Image: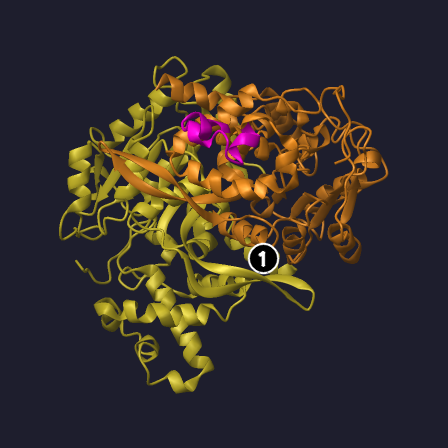
Chain colours: A orange, B yellow
Amino acid sequence: VAGDEADNELARPRTSPVNRGWHWPLVLVLLLQFSTPAASQVPDPLSTWTDGGARDVILQFVGRVTDPDSDEYVPPMARIAVFDNDGTLWSERPWIEGLFWQKLLRDAAEANPELHDVQPYQAALGFDEVFFENGGYRQAAAHVRDYVATLEREAFDNKVRAFFRARRHPDLDVPLSQTVYQPALELLDYLRANDFRVFICSGGGADFIRVIAGDFYGIESDRVIGTSYKKSLQFVEGRAVLRMTGELNTFNNRDEKAVNIDLHIGQRPLLVMGNAGGAGDIGMLSYSQGRAGPSLQLLIEHDDAEREYAYAEDDNASLAAAEANGWTVVSVKDDWSAVYGKPVPRRQRSDR
Amino acid sequence: VAGDEADNELARPRTSPVNRGWHWPLVLVLLLQFSTPAASQVPDPLSTWTDGGARDVILQFVGRVTDPDSDEYVPPMARIAVFDNDGTLWSERPWIEGLFWQKLLRDAAEANPELHDVQPYQAALGFDEVFFENGGYRQAAAHVRDYVATLEREAFDNKVRAFFRARRHPDLDVPLSQTVYQPALELLDYLRANDFRVFICSGGGADFIRVIAGDFYGIESDRVIGTSYKKSLQFVEGRAVLRMTGELNTFNNRDEKAVNIDLHIGQRPLLVMGNAGGAGDIGMLSYSQGRAGPSLQLLIEHDDAEREYAYAEDDNASLAAAEANGWTVVSVKDDWSAVYGKPVPRRQRSDR
């Protein structure tokens, strides 16, 4: 019992008012609202966003949809904001969940020494990033699924927690919590202060993200949509447990993001932010734009090799879609005056 | 645009603070919280629940899990409450979604006169409840799926809205909103006032329930888990639309309720309320009880033919599970001093 409650601490958010007992800034905001009933009450909203670009677009949009006198007013019930995770809320170089996969493979190999000389276990045991970055993850997927299928639901969560406690970012040499984008956190806070409900919709594993969504982003476990395995209910000595299976339930990427937003949320998002990188967010950005009434689409362009990473898609599909559809491109280099919450000393710089 | 916003009005809740602009009672509750930081601040909580039974169990449980000094304290992040819908939040005699199915069949027949003399369309056109109650729904399911597969996502919602605007309860002769249980509404409000996040997990259609969940229960569309069809993203004249398909995505009943609670919420519920009737809630009640730490399971027994309906399961599975596992049985007759919010004159009484 004690262990369970303690584990929940990790999932406790830093920021969201609904998840804390009492939250003085919220109360102040509430009181302020009485004198100024409409719009956007955060002291210095989006302070790490530079003036004149995406910041202005966001402030004007939120101002319009929260102003009861505006033609574009949207009631709180429909203020849904959806964010991709990798490359949108935190850095995606390297792929953090991939590092967790490597840890699962090491755990599997520890339990079975016969695997030590077999790939992908050998590469995982040797921390051979090059193997994984060059197609190894594709080979690893089936092995990861097999191992996950040996776990109860809560055991999986415990493995994720242990990973985040131990692991630091390989390039940046900081805890993974510090690879969260400060401008994204400010946008989440600003939207919540304006009665938006904020969701993650990620190609990454829902159960993986849920463990840290509260602590890193102030986002509740029930507001995380992601890739998932099928599970089955079983009774073990009279106790109901969910077992993981090795079968994929949904790969939450591209068009599936729109489908799963509907499954989990049941309405088109008013605002979506994704990033260029794997063309994964075009589906949900388009779905948001198809909303009857106002909507806003934001696409992050990773163009800052100095402060973060610079990369693009081979076919430039996401940026081309942004141009064709009038989505707002957020340049890391130009639109963000800071990337991370604390200055992050680069141990090594990579433009992978 | 205007139509879309107007439609959203129907989904606007009566009670939930997060879904309205400003809500004076919430503010008063907030201010009260400063003098008495812990526990359960609703003026007269559960006023239609009688003393000495389930009401006492609920008040004591919520008191313990919200008291920071209690060994059983549970932080707000883990205060998840899950409710079945049919027979738990509103009356399930007759099956309301079945009446909607009949409407869909009439719509299909209107578009295709060749169906007029074919079952189940003929029965739907003739409002032949007896046909449907005696196996007709089983026959109808495939026809309903076929018709749904002709619809875009939003067109389906519009059909649900039109149904609820037009339809009255066949026995009670009241709008369907008045078949909601007043004691259940009070429990939802009491839990929300104690920082619980409140979800529906129903064997009924998620998209069907979502249209009225805000208005009837103050529950957001993203907190409705239910049976669903698969959908696919398509582009129609450049606009992204989801199309319904006739393929079932999940039949959210029995064990699947636990599986889908994990898919949507990602943690075991602290409190679950279901009802005896179709054994559909045993899975999620068991899953809640398997939670490490405190939890509460409530099972409604429909034993009041005078004020509502009286019915049981042939094998008595739900009540037997309640007895074996120590779940709290909520007797409509004994635990609720009122059933509906307004006195409902019975046009005809049935003990189906």
Residue shown at the point (48%, 38%) measured from the top left: A144
Residue at image position (43%, 40%) is A146
**Rendered location of residue A48, percent (x, y):** 78, 28
Q: Nearer the viewer, residue B284 or B154?
A: B284
Residue that numbered label 1 is attached to: B6
Q: Position of residue A95 (x, y in %)?
A: 63, 35
Which of the image's four quarters has the C terminus of chain B?
Answer: bottom left
Q: Residue furthest top?
A: B69
The kind of secondary structure element at disc 1 is helix
**Residue A11: x, y in percent?**
50, 26
Asked which quadrant contains residue B182, the reply is top left
A120 drawn magenta: yes
Query: What x and y, as percent, mark residue A233?
Result: 32, 41
The residue lying toward the viewer, choosing from A4 and A92, is A92
Q: Bounds of the magenta span?
A: A106-124
* Kind of residue at disc 1: Ala
At label 1, counting other C-alpha atoms closer than 10 Å, the crowd grade (few under 14, some 14-19, many 20 or more) is few
Question: Along the horizontal axis of the image, is A333 left or right of B290?
Answer: right
Q: Left of A77 or right of it: where is A70?
A: right
